[in-house]
Amino acid sequence: MIAGPDQEIFIFPLNTVLFPGGTLPLKVFEQRYIEMTKACLRDSRPFGVCLIREGREVGTAAVPEPVGCLAVIEQWDMPQFGVFHLVARGGERFRIRETRIAPNHLMSAVVEPIAPDAATDQVDSLCRQVLQAVIEKVGAAQFPAPVRLDDASWVGYRLAEVLPLDARLKQELLETTGAGQRLERLRALLVQQGLKASEA
């Protein structure tokens, strides 16, 4: 959780988009991110995952997209010295207000939370059927428990994760305000692929 609008967190720019509730396995080997991981574990703090807008995952600090998702470390291991294996869980979304780059190129940012989706949005039938088919094919264990096919926000985020979408489109879905609007966008993408609710 973000305590307030002026909380500062570490930022991990990646070539991937993390959604609330999603699972993110990470192999951490760069010294700056090892230090970040140690600090987060020590203080039970989340860090922020943002899609890279400009730059690369390694080397000098990349330019992140302004909207990201908190990541809470749920599991960690160090199978060899200097390498962390992490499993992080997506928390709430946030917007970067300002960034600071340390001498080792580790980025931190003052962020403000983005309000969660309203719980009143209806689940689109096509999106639900497609996601249900995916869950039945790969197994419910591959998705965050419990499976909530009646939750528009959960369905939208999980569908955005599993569909073969460009990272920029996934970022657009992360930034979308409202589960209903996110499902409308996903439904349009599914219909473009020729899918109909009765065929999903």
Image (spheres, helix red, strand yellow):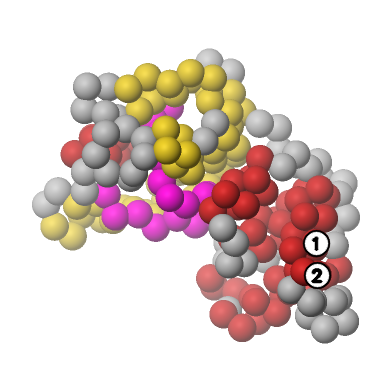
Q: Which of 150/196 is in front? A: 196
User: Residue 141's image quarter?
Assistant: bottom right
- Provide residue 6's location: percent of width, then percent of height: 53, 16
Q: Compared to 83, does 34 lie above or below?
A: above
Amino acid type of the residue that numbered disc 1 sits on in the rendered structure: Ala
165 displayed left or right of 10 = right
Say few, some or many: other residues with alpha carbon within 10 Å of mark 1 (under 14 / 14 to 19 / 20 or more): some
Magenta stretch in the rendered image = 7-28
- Provide residue 62's location: percent of width, then percent of height: 36, 35
Residue 6 falls within the magenta-colored stretch: no
In the picture as drawn, the residue positioned furthest to the left comes out as: 81
Q: Which mark is residue 160?
A: none
| Callout 2–callout 1 Cβ contact below 8 Å | yes
193 displayed left or right of 47 = right
- Provide residue 193's location: percent of width, then percent of height: 74, 73
Q: Residue at x 78, y 42 (%)?
A: 178
75 displayed left or right of 119 = left
Residue at the disc numbered 1: 188
Say few, some or many: other residues with alpha carbon within 10 Å of mark 2 (under 14 / 14 to 19 / 20 or more): few
Q: Which residue is drawn at 57% across and 49% down?
A: 168
Question: How far, Cα to Cα, is label 2 from label 1?
Answer: 5 Å
Q: Which mark is residue 191?
A: 2
Amino acid type of the residue that numbered disc 2 sits on in the rendered structure: Val
Residue 38 seen anywhere in this rendered image of the structure: no
- Provide residue 99's location: percent of width, then percent of height: 43, 21
Task: Name the quarter where the C terminus is drawn.
Answer: bottom right
